[in-house]
Amino acid sequence: MSSIKNLNGRDILLSMVHAIQENKQYLGDVDGLIGDGDHGMNMNKGFTLYEQQLGDKETSLSDGLFDLGTVLMNKIGGSMGPIYGTIFMEMSDASLDADEITLPLFKNMMEAALEGLYGIIDARPGDKTLVDTLYPAVESLKASVETGKDFVQALEDMKAAAEKGKDSTKDMVAKYGRSSRLGERSRGVLDAGATSCCVILKAMADGMIHQLKN
């Protein structure tokens, strides 16, 4: 298969939900090193509320991303609610009328997410935020489209790019958020947002790969 049916969004979304739930403690531990330690708890709250709202209903990927974004925007507060809300709602808007999610369309969805994010935050690559995970993931997808890669391989490459991007934040000094007050002392620790973004992108990709292979 070279595309995913937009209507089959439920399993992909639940893959993302379960990944956050399973990593709640880890995300809290990462955040606790230079932040206030509540990132895992807040993310878990938002994703679990979405899971409860979804119940046993089916959903398209577009509709589910919009609904998840709305829950996060309205229910988890802090900076991460609007950030992840924007990411998922922009991805939804970019795919709303599609029956099939192809690699070029998924690339467009991820580009829309990044552009939407740039519209609400000042951070750019190198500033030790989730942009350092999202940006290389987008660049990887763009390269895969340009070289005509298979969708599954493109998703595997995106996962690797997201992981590398997340890991790169360890050597950066935070410029935004609570940890920015630490200056040089923020170096040597992963950024919590970059870490949760990596967890989410890898889970989304795994959910999509499962459908592409079956």
Image (cartoon, grey):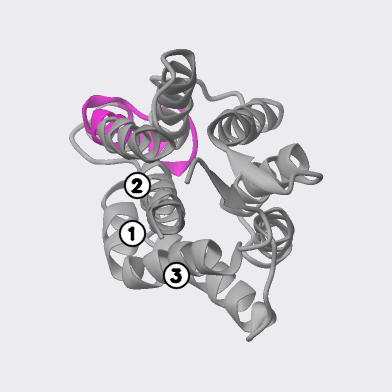
Closer to us: 31 or 82 = 82
User: How many other residues sit within 10 Å of disc 2, few (<14), some (14-19) or many (≥20)?
Assistant: many
165 in relation to 85, above or below: above
Residue situated furthest front in the rendering: 1
CA separation in Å, label 2 and label 3: 14 Å
CA gap, disc 2 and disc 1: 7 Å
* Image point (49%, 39%), residue name: 177
Q: What label sits on residue 27 in the rendered view?
A: 1
Determine whether 85 is above or below 70 in the image.
Answer: above
- Out of 120 and 210, give the one closest to the viewer: 210
Question: Can you tell which mark lies on residue 195?
Answer: 2
Q: Residues within 10 Å of mark 3 (few under 14, many from 20)?
A: some
Q: Quadrant of residue 179?
A: top left
Q: Where's residue 60, x and y in %?
A: 69, 61
What residue span does the magenta drawing correspond to?
165-183
Q: Earlier in the sequence, mark 1 or mark 3?
A: 1
Check contact, mark 2 vs mark 1: CB within 8 A. Answer: yes
Name the amino acid, label 1. Leu
Q: Closer to the camera: disc 2 or disc 3? A: 2
* Marker disc for residue 41: 3
Amino acid beneath label 3: Met
- In this view, the residue farthest toward the top is 146
Q: How far apart are the alpha carbons under marks 1 and 3?
A: 8 Å
**Label 2 is placed on what type of residue?**
Thr
Q: Earlier in the sequence, mark 2 or mark 3?
A: 3
